[in-house]
């Protein structure tokens, strides 16, 4: 038997893992993300980054990096907005993606070539420590929920046998210690946050890291781990669920413990600049201003169509409250 975190890592990142090769996201895929919902998600983050430059907190030579980019839509949407609001930055900034899978690097390279031609040079890095920038704005969407996790229940950790059956007979001391830290008797314990935060710290001398994901700072003491397949949701412990048939062919995820994320980044040296709902974050990042600019263009049909998409991002009953922003700074005044 193997620890559940090892099993989940193989499920998502093994040779035939779910994320090892390109998967469609959105209507044709297994789930939706904020990026697949509206281009105004990336545009709003780019608008915020530009505002930091105008305030002197970042320079025009800042490198824009995405981690966990999938095809590269988010980074592409941000660059597209930069070209509209501050086109001069395209002459001074550099753009990159941290991606360890060569197959996804090829997909991202081709996507950028199709979208921008030779106007934008895309750099790839296998590890954040390879970036080596003086200044960087790093963005990520739904990566913390994709870290392998262990499962804890009544002082035991989950083990998985060759038939994909789960037994709470393990005694992983590190997972149990993390669970004890947060008063967690039942649920998911993410593995790898500390190593990721430490590697990101070395990516640049000065940095803003902003990430969106779903979860809370408070522990629910229950299992949230679930599987997405064809826009259907299956709780991991649903009776009769065939894990063998779903293994590597579907997404497996869980609610993020943001207290754990914050502790990992602060231990690495970052300062926590913000933790707030996606609704509040996008509003404060300037989303209403961007929509107002679109309205002034006079195309009412386009405005209403985009407004409807944006509602999904900020509606409290949809993504607005369930999704959170966490922002960390390094050497930012």
Image: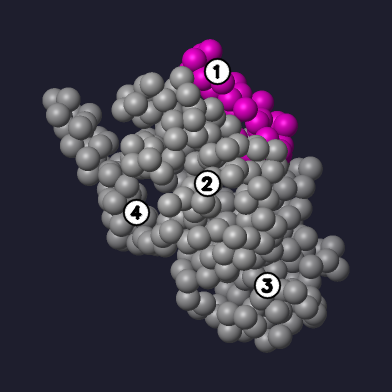
CB atoms at circles 1 and 4 under 8 Å apart?
Answer: no
> Which residue is at a point 52% across and 77% down the rendered structure image?
219
| Element type where label 2 sits in the image | strand
> Which residue is at a point 62% across and 71% down the rendered structure image?
188
List the residue tagged with mark 1: 113
List the residue tagged with mark 2: 207
Q: CA distance from mark 3 to mark 1?
A: 42 Å
List the residue tagged with mark 4: 281
CB atoms at circles 3 and 1 under 8 Å apart?
Answer: no
| Element type where label 4 sits in the image | helix
Image position, residue 187 (x, y; %)? 60, 75
Q: Quadrant of the N terminus?
A: bottom right
Specify start and end residues of the magenta stretch as a single range: 97-126
Structural crowding at the residue carrying mark 3, measured as other residues with C-alpha within 10 Å and reported as few (<14), some (14–19) or many (≥20): many
Q: CA distance from mark 3 to mark 2?
A: 33 Å
Foreground disc of the pair 3, 1 = 1
List the residue tagged with mark 3: 151
Image position, residue 192 (x, y; %)? 69, 60
The earlier-in-sequence mark between 3 and 2 is 3
> Which residue is at a point 41% across and 60% down the rendered structure image?
274
């Amino acid at each position: 038997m193997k620890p559940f975190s090892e099993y989940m890592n193989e499920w998502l990142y093994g040779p035939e893992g779910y994320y090892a090769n390109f998967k469609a996201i959105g209507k044709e895929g297994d789930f939706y993300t904020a990026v697949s919902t509206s281009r105004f998600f990336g545009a709003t983050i780019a608008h915020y980054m530009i505002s930091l430059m105008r305030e002197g907190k970042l320079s025009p030579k800042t490198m824009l990096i995405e981690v966990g980019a999938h095809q590269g839509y988010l980074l592409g949407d941000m660059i597209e907005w930069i070209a509209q609001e501050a086109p001069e930055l395209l002459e001074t900034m550099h753009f990159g993606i941290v991606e360890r899978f060569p197959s996804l690097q090829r997909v991202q390279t081709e996507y950028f070539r199709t979208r921008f031609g030779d106007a934008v040079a895309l750099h790839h890095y296998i590890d954040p420590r390879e970036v080596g920038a003086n200044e960087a704005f790093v963005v990520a969407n739904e990566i913390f929920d994709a870290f392998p996790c262990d499962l804890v229940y009544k002082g035991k950790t989950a083990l998985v046998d060759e038939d994909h059956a789960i037994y709470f007979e393990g005694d992983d001391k590190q997972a149990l210690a993390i669970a004890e830290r947060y008063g967690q008797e039942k649920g998911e314990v993410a593995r790898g946050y500390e190593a990721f935060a430490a590697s990101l710290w070395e990516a640049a001398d000065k940095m803003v890291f902003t990430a969106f994901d779903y979860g809370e700072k408070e522990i629910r003491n229950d299992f949230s781990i679930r599987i997405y397949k064809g826009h259907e949701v299956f709780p991991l412990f649903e009776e009769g669920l065939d894990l063998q048939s779903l293994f590597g062919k579907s997404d497996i995820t869980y609610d993020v413990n943001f207290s754990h994320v914050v502790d990992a980044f602060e231990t690495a040296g970052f300062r926590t600049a913000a933790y707030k709902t996606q609704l509040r974050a996008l509003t404060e990042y300037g989303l209403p201003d961007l929509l107002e600019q679109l309205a002034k263009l006079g195309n009412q049909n386009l405005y209403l169509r985009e407004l409807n998409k944006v509602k999904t991002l900020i509606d409290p009953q949809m993504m607005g409250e369930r999704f959170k922003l966490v922002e960390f700074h390094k050497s930012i005044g």
